[in-house]
Image (cartoon, rainbow, N blue to C red):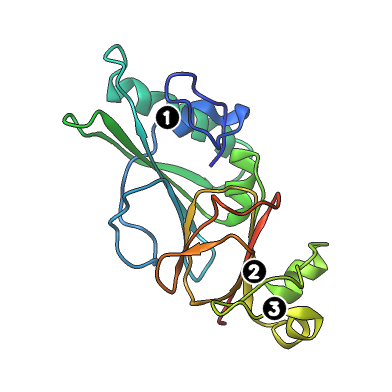
């Protein structure tokens, strides 16, 4: 979820266009992605491709209140949604931990495409065949948990499997088990990955189905 970077929160992976929305994305129940408990900034994708983005950041400045942040995020979502017949992006909630000073913010998106356009980052969720049709290059160097390489034959064997391609290096929760991943990906269980050590511009996760 990279938007118009807020200088106070200094959210590392947010792009300039969507600054406000970012500031205010608190925590809601994640859409179809297991537990709603999130401790770090996380993207969650459900089986239908809907996305929930939860941002957790330090927010010590006392001159901002949650209502102001909420109003800012709501306005950003409204501006985006005005281009469509039906709303695509929703601010779910904003909350602050008074003890730690951290703000939790959540936005939900109808699709990975909406997440991409709103935040000006790349996020694809679909089958391998769909990714290839859209011009994405699937890396033959994806590895499984044992270090085995996918290869060209492996790509052809998994054309109906879902794949996630993301330039956002946030943690990510996915709807199916992770079979292959970009080198440098750290797994947190079978359906969650951390991309902070991935050196390529985009990280990829090939799922079990």
Q: Which residue is mark 3?
A: 149
User: For residue 156, what is the image quadrant?
Assistant: bottom right
SS state under label 2 = strand
Question: How far is the residue under mark 3 from the one under mark 2?
Answer: 21 Å
Question: How far is the residue under mark 3 from the one under mark 1?
Answer: 39 Å
Q: Which residue is mark 2?
A: 126
SS state under label 1 = helix
Q: How far across and how far down the image is residue 164, in percent?
A: 62, 64
SS state under label 3 = loop
Task: State which tag comes first along the sequence, 1 or 2.
Answer: 1
Q: Residue at x 68, y 53 (%)?
A: 202
Viewer-closest of 41 and 119: 41
Q: Residue at x 53, y 47 (%)?
A: 88
In the image, is 137 to the left or to the right of 31? Answer: right
State if disc 2 and disc 3 touch (CB < 8 Å).
no
Q: Residue at x 65, y 43 (%)?
A: 121
Give the class, few, some or many, for how many residues have Cα within 10 Å of label 2's Cα (few <14, many ≥20).
Answer: some
Viewer-closest of 106 and 39: 39
Q: Nearer the viewer, mark 3 or mark 2?
A: 3
Residue extending furthest toward the left? 99
Q: Which residue is mark 1?
A: 23
């Amino acid at each position: 979820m990279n938007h118009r970077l807020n200088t106070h929160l200094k959210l590392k992976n947010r792009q300039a266009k969507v600054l406000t929305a970012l500031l205010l994305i608190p925590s809601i129940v994640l859409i179809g992605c297991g537990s709603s408990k999130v401790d770090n900034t996380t993207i969650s994708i459900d089986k239908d491709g809907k996305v929930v983005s939860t941002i957790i950041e330090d927010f010590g400045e006392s001159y901002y209140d949650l209502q102001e942040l909420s109003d800012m995020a709501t306005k950003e979502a409204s501006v985006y949604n005005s281009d469509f017949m039906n709303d695509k992006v929703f601010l779910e909630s904003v909350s602050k931990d008074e003890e730690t000073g951290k703000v939790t913010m959540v936005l939900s998106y109808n699709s990975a495409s909406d997440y991409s356009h709103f935040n000006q980052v790349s996020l694809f969720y679909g089958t391998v065949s769909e990714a290839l049709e859209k011009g994405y290059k699937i890396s033959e160097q994806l590895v499984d948990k044992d270090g085995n390489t996918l290869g060209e034959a492996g790509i052809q064997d998994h054309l109906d499997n879902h794949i996630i391609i993301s330039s956002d290096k946030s943690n990510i929760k996915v709807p199916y088990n992770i079979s292959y991943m970009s080198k440098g990906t750290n797994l947190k269980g079978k359906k969650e990955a951390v991309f902070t050590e991935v050196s390529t511009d985009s990280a990829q996760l090939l799922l079990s189905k």
